[in-house]
Image (cartoon, rainbow, N blue to C red):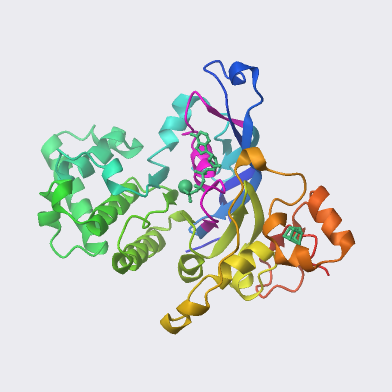
């Protein structure tokens, strides 16, 4: 299902915190930039992962795409988010960072849907699952046309049939029992599968899933991700999966962008990045994946932690944690500490035609 036509192109997206209600620096203090010219592109039907440790700017990037950043406080200070709605061939993309809010609201939920870490946040605890899933039709663009069909009951019945079908696809053997339940009557894994169905019902072109399995038991994480992957593939929906887990990336994603301290440091087809990781940070994340249970004692973690944006330094932000830098020549070390490197295309990657970029001075050493 995956094609090379883009559905989303994020270009140089930078977000800063510290603005007041008027969009001016709060108390005259320079806002703190937390993401720095983030760029990546997601193709139609593709499973794309954004990976990095806690605090590196994954959620801020996701919220920036749909302008769901905290307000007052945060603001996009640079960049574009081109969304290819593709209603007609050759339709130009719209820039989600700039279109009027009313237009953006038509895209949110129905064309680009979200799944969050905690399913209870997305569901109303005092309303049945059936009612909540039916609500989706009320707010999606498709229903505006469908409500014109006379006979609301029959309309609801059509929707229930579609919902039942999707619940079956999501692995529920008894969809009617789920429909009659309240959220507290279902487990975390079941609720997250309901959220996947809810996100897919309006037939979005893209789902943004921000750590959708982090709050779940390890045993049900794989089940929920398999349902997301399978249903997205069947419906041709692209997925932006946000995770800190390289194991999940290697198992589910087609392409990946690795993020560190607000910047994309490596991006490429998952096979290329896993087989030939070029950035020392990516190498560190991969060394932390257990290949089997007997390996657990030999796992390597990256010493230190992601710096807070107020501590971002000039040059490579990974330098303080980078073994390669410590072992590199004095010339490279000086560059690491002072210069910024634009992404470099890597030659000789396994998947011809796929681009593989990394930002590191030591790659060619
Ligand atoms: N509301 C906020 N006010 C100020 N700074 C914030 C706010 N939200 C996020 N940040 C800062 O932005 C940076 C990126 O945060 P973000 O939540 O995007 O990280 P993340 O990669 O999603 O981490 P996690 O894996 O823990 O979810 C962090 O340094 C964080 O402190
Ligand atoms: S640029 Fe230097 S400090 Fe940064 S990852 Fe590469 S070698 Fe390490
Ligand atoms: Mg996050």
Of 245 and 252, which appears nearest the observer?
Answer: 245
Query: Up-down: is 81 above or below 48?
Result: above
* Residue 176: x %, y % from top left: 11, 55
**Picture residue at 23% right of the left edge, 65% below the top:** 171
Residue 97 sits in which quadrant? top right
How many numbered circles are shown? 0
* Residue 69: x %, y % from top left: 49, 33
Residue 271 sits in which quadrant? bottom right
- Which quarter shows the C terminus? bottom right
Relative placement, left or right, of 197 versus 336 is: left
* Residue 260: x %, y % from top left: 62, 53
Query: Up-down: is 348 above or below 99?
Result: below
Part of the protein shown in magenta: 49-76
* Ligand 2 lies in quarter: bottom right
Relative placement, left or right, of 72 versus 349 is: left
Q: Does the magenta segment cover residue 297?
A: no
Of 57 and 89, which appears nearest the observer?
Answer: 57
Relative placement, left or right, of 241 versus 203 is: right
**Picture residue at 48% right of the left edge, 81% below the top:** 295
Residue 127 sits in which quadrant? top left
**Picture residue at 28% right of the left edge, 37% below the top:** 143
- Residue 142, can we see it? yes
* Residue 209: x %, y % from top left: 42, 51
Relative placement, left or right, of 235 versus 183 is: right
Residue reaching furthest to the right: 331
Query: Up-down: is 88 above or below 359?
Result: above
Of 36 and 344, which appears nearest the observer?
Answer: 36
Q: Does the magenta segment cover residue 73?
A: yes
- Residue 339, can we see it? no
């Amino acid at each position: 299902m995956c094609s090379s036509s883009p559905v989303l192109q994020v270009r140089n997206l930078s977000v800063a915190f510290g603005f007041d209600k008027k969009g001016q620096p709060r108390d005259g203090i320079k806002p703190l930039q937390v993401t720095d010219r983030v760029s990546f592109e997601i193709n139609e039907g593709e499973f794309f992962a954004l990976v990095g440790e806690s605090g590196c700017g994954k959620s801020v990037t996701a919220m920036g795409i749909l302008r769901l950043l905290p307000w007052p406080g945060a603001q996009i200070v640079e960049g574009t988010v081109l969304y290819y709605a593709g209603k007609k061939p050759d339709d130009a993309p719209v820039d989600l960072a700039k279109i009027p809010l009313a237009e953006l609201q038509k895209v949110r939920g129905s064309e680009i849907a979200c799944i969050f870490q905690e399913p209870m946040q997305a569901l109303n605890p005092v309303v049945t699952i059936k009612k909540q899933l039916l609500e989706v039709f009320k707010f999606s663009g498709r229903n505006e046309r469908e409500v014109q069909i006379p006979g609301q009951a029959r309309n609801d019945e059509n929707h229930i049939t579609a919902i039942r079908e999707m619940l079956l696809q999501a692995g529920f053997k008894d969809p009617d029992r789920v429909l009659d339940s309240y959220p507290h009557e279902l487990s975390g894994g079941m609720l997250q599968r309901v959220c996947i169905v809810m996100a897919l019902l309006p037939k979005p072109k893209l789902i943004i899933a921000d750590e959708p399995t982090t709050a779940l038991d390890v045993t049900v994480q794989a089940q929920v991700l398999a349902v997301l992957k399978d249903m997205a593939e069947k419906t041709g929906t692209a997925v932006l999966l946000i995770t800190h887990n390289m194991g999940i990336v290697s198992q589910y994603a087609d392409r990946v962008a690795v993020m560190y301290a607000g910047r994309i440091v490596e991006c490429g087809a998952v096979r290329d990045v896993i087989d030939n990781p070029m950035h020392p940070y990516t190498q560190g994340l991969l060394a932390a994946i257990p290949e089997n249970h007997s390996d657990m004692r030999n796992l390597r973690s990256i010493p230190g932690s992601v710096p807070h944006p107020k501590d971002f330094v000039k040059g490579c932000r990974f330098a303080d944690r980078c073994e390669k830098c410590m072992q590199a020549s004095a010339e490279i070390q000086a560059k690491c500490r002072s210069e910024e490197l634009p992404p470099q295309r890597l030659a000789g990657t396994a998947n011809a035609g796929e681009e593989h970029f990394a930002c590191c001075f030591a790659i060619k050493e």
